[in-house]
Amino acid sequence: MATANPQRLSVMLGLLAVFLASLPRYLAGGHETRLSLILMMAAVVTAVVIVHWRLLSSEGKRRTPGLLKRLGLSLLAGLAAMSLWHALFSAWVGWEIALSHGATLGLLLHVMVLWWRREPE
């Protein structure tokens, strides 16, 4: 069984950020069903994050802020990269799409860095 660790918590918070960054896209597009599903998934992930936080050891809680800083930087890098990509290689489709794609790329970057720097169990 998997144990609570700060890396998983940061990934879940990143997933929550991706859900929230996708909201404007679906609001602007009038996709109420998808919007409802995303809000339900965000509520479930929020509940899991709260439980996971409570299960973290004090050492894990101490390491969490550094991981959240890395997550934030990854999200900003993803947003910058996707904004540049859309500006250079596609017709600009709007800030909602760039925000959604950028958050997704940022989460992928964060997970890849965690994977490359993984610590022995």
Image (cartoon, helix red, strand yellow):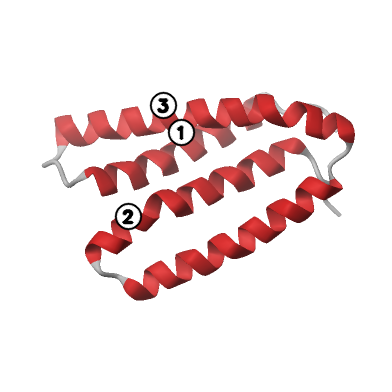
Depth check: give the residue in front, 39 or 9. 39
In space, the residues marked 2 and 3 are separated at their CA atoms by 20 Å
Q: Which residue of the protein is positioned furthest toward the bottom in this rendering? A: 33
Q: Earlier in the sequence, mark 2 or mark 3?
A: 2
Are dots 1 and 2 in contact, CB under 8 Å? no
> How many dots with numbers?
3
Query: Which of the 4 quarters of the picture holds residue 79?
Result: top left
Mark 3 and mark 2 in contact (Cβ < 8 Å)?
no
Q: Residue visible at 27% across and 48% down?
A: 97
Distance from Cα at disc 1 to Cα at disc 2: 17 Å
> With 31 as the anchor, is 91 left or right in this view?
left
Q: Which type of secondary structure does the marked residue at label 1 adopt?
A: helix
Q: Dot 3, crowdedness within 10 Å: few (<14), some or many (≥20)?
A: some
Residue assigned mark 1 = 75
Q: From the image, tell me which residue sits under label 2.
A: 24
- Whether label 3 touches label 1, CB < 8 Å: yes
Report which residue position mark 3 lands on: 77
**Above or below, comparing residue 28 to residue 106 in the picture:** below
In the orientation shown, which residue stands out farthest toward the left? 91
Q: Secondary structure at mark 2?
A: helix
Give above or below for 68 relative to 35: above
